[in-house]
Image (spheres, helix red, strand yellow):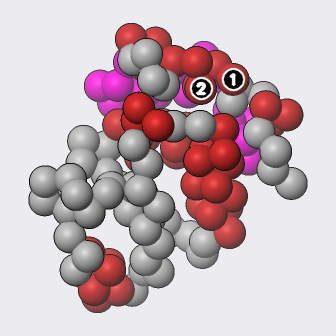
Amino acid sequence: MNLRSYEEAGASPEDSQRVAAIGLPYVHLPVTPSAITQSVIEQVIQTMHDLPKPLLVYCRSAFRATFMTLVYGMTYHQHTLDYAKGKGRSLGFDFDADPHFKPWIEACATKTALRLP
């Protein structure tokens, strides 16, 4: 699952062929940090849930991919907010320090914050 916009440096529509070459399905759902909404998060998390595993989720710096993967874990694997934040920090991502993501990781800490089955 590619979270990058094709307008980002280094992003390419050819990613679909590269991912297919390693035998994984390709989904392009661009996520712009400054435009993140509950609807965007729900769409990404639901798509992650529906895709076969293993699943490759990526973006330019891995910040968006890590965020979405941690929200997926809170939504479908009962990971706690403290676990998600700690895991993010252990990977070099402090969601508390990012004004676009801090409110969302806290809001997504309970499954009821997202409108998912």
Tell me if residue 82 is in the magenta stretch: yes
Tell me what residue is drawn at x 86 percent, y 54 percent: 117
Instruction: Give coordinates of residue 53: x percent, y percent.
Output: 56, 70
CA separation in Å, label 2 and label 1: 5 Å
Quarter that holds the N terminus: bottom left
Residue found farthest to the left = 10
Instruction: Give coordinates of residue 69: x percent, y percent.
Output: 52, 45
Region of the chain picked out in magenta, as a range: 73-94
Q: Main secondary structure of the magenta part?
A: helix
Tell me what residue is drawn at x 43 percent, y 16 percent: 99
Tell me if residue 19 is in the magenta stretch: no
Tell me what residue is drawn at x 59 percent, y 47 percent: 40
Q: Is residue 83 visible?
A: no
Q: Nearer the viewer, residue 104 or 52?
A: 104
Q: Nearer the viewer, residue 106 or 53?
A: 106
Instruction: Give coordinates of residue 10: x percent, y percent.
Output: 13, 59
Q: Which residue is mark 2?
A: 104
Type of the residue with mark 1: Ala
Q: Is residue 10 above or below residue 91?
A: below
Left or right of 57 in this view: 105: right
Q: Residue 107 shows which numbered tag?
A: 1
Identify the element where label 2 is drawn: helix
Left or right of 115 in this view: 44: left
Q: Is residue 8 above or below residue 62?
A: below
Q: Quadrant of residue 111?
A: top right
Type of the residue with mark 2: Trp
> Callout 1: 10 Å neighbours few (<14), some, many (20+)?
some
Q: Residue 62 shows which numbered tag?
A: none
Tell me what residue is drawn at x 79 percent, y 31 percent: 113
- Are circles 2 and 1 on residues that touch, CB within 8 Å? yes
